[in-house]
Image (cartoon, rainbow, N blue to C red):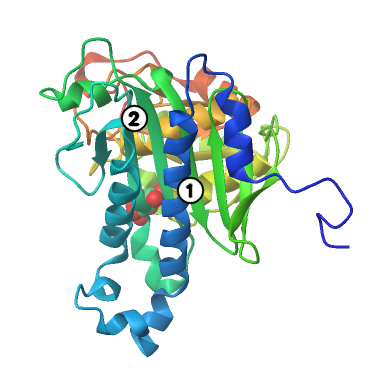
Amino acid sequence: MEKGQGETPLITIAQHILQEQRRFPGATGEFSFLLSGITLAAKQIQAKVRRAGLTDILGDQDSANVHGEVQQKLDLYSNEVLLRALSFRESVGILASEENEHPAIMPHKSPVAKYAVVFDPLDGSSNIDVNVSVGTTFSILRRPEGADFDDPARWVLQPGRRQMAAGYVVYGSSTVMVYTVGNGVHGFTLDPAVGAFVLSHENIKMPDQGKYYSVNEAYRDNFPDEYITFLNELRSGELNHPYASRYIGSMVADFHRTLLRGGVFMYPPTRDFAQGKLRLLYEANPIAMLAEQAGGSATDGRQRILDIQPEDIHQRTPLIVGSRVEMQRFAELLVPASPDTGQGMAFPP
Ligand code: P6P
């Protein structure tokens, strides 16, 4: 019997957001209206992502579109969709995107604007051509006391622990949206039959320990010693059992597996990326909030991701995120920071 026929009624993300909204005293529905802008954008993006190959080959009624939308690179298209969907919300004052050098100031400059939204519209977009899962990540911050529109960076350069909400959409075998407002982590699968995100993973808890580690092993020789020691332990079975490796090269997809199955995902510092490759504000922070809400943790190898005070909107950070057992063991392997290597990581000679 299909779920929903005579069983518990389907709960859409819109209904769920309204329930969660009750946690914010004084929120008069604008918060849920904001989140509904993200779900609307996610539906539009997934429709395009699903047709990427077809559009290239067959074109479609849009292909004659004078705006050349279907020829647009999908990440630029996704960026436009999110900017459009969110700029009509008076509660949103500032939008910062991986695709834009500077934050976008909403034209309304409403005095009642309460939120800034930071997002990566299509993370891993280079994988689309080979039909690998990609994702959208987002983070919602409250406007700091006294912050004005003449200083948009101040709205977003806040430590991740101040996020009001965070989430991602993974465009995989199905389209799943996962979000938290600080009251647990919940997943919703897009039901194409009704065009709604339907609750499919309520109150996700990351297993205490997993069986996969996820890292790009091609850079292994550049990893700081602690990471190499840790990976050797996982491989050897010293941490209760031997691990297998899974790495998709799309952070959202690699984290989604880690969230559901446990284990650890990491992008360590390397010689090319001494500060790591992933972006703090719109990749590491939302992932870190979700991981902690689900019982896991996330650090930059030294400190809690959510405690990092950002200095630049697009700054990078090393990221290691995962289950309690693995993260605890990694912390035990850390050597005291040394002044000459910045991050405190001793690079192999
Ligand atoms: P590498 C995608 O380009 C991305 O930003 C993340 O989604 C992914 O985890 C990482 O880069 C992959 O980087 O160097 O392993 O190809």
Q: Secondary structure at mark 2?
A: loop
Query: Measuring 35% from the left and 60% from the top, which residue is drawn there?
Result: 125
**Quadrant of the snapshot with the N terminus:** bottom right
Q: In the image, 52: left or right of 24?
A: left
CA separation, marks 2 and 1? 16 Å
Q: Residues within 10 Å of mark 2 (few under 14, many from 20)?
A: many
Q: Which mark is residue 91?
A: 2
Which residue type does callout 1 highlight?
Thr
Q: In the image, 117: left or right of 34?
A: left
**Quadrant of the snapshot with the C terminus:** top left
Query: Measuring 61% from the left and 23% from the top, which residue is drawn there?
Result: 183
Q: In the image, 250: left or right of 90?
A: right
Q: Specify which label sits upstream in the sequence, 2 or 1.
A: 1
Q: Which mark is residue 39?
A: 1
Judged by depth in the image, the label closer to the viewer, 2 or 1, is: 2
Which residue type does callout 2 highlight?
Ser
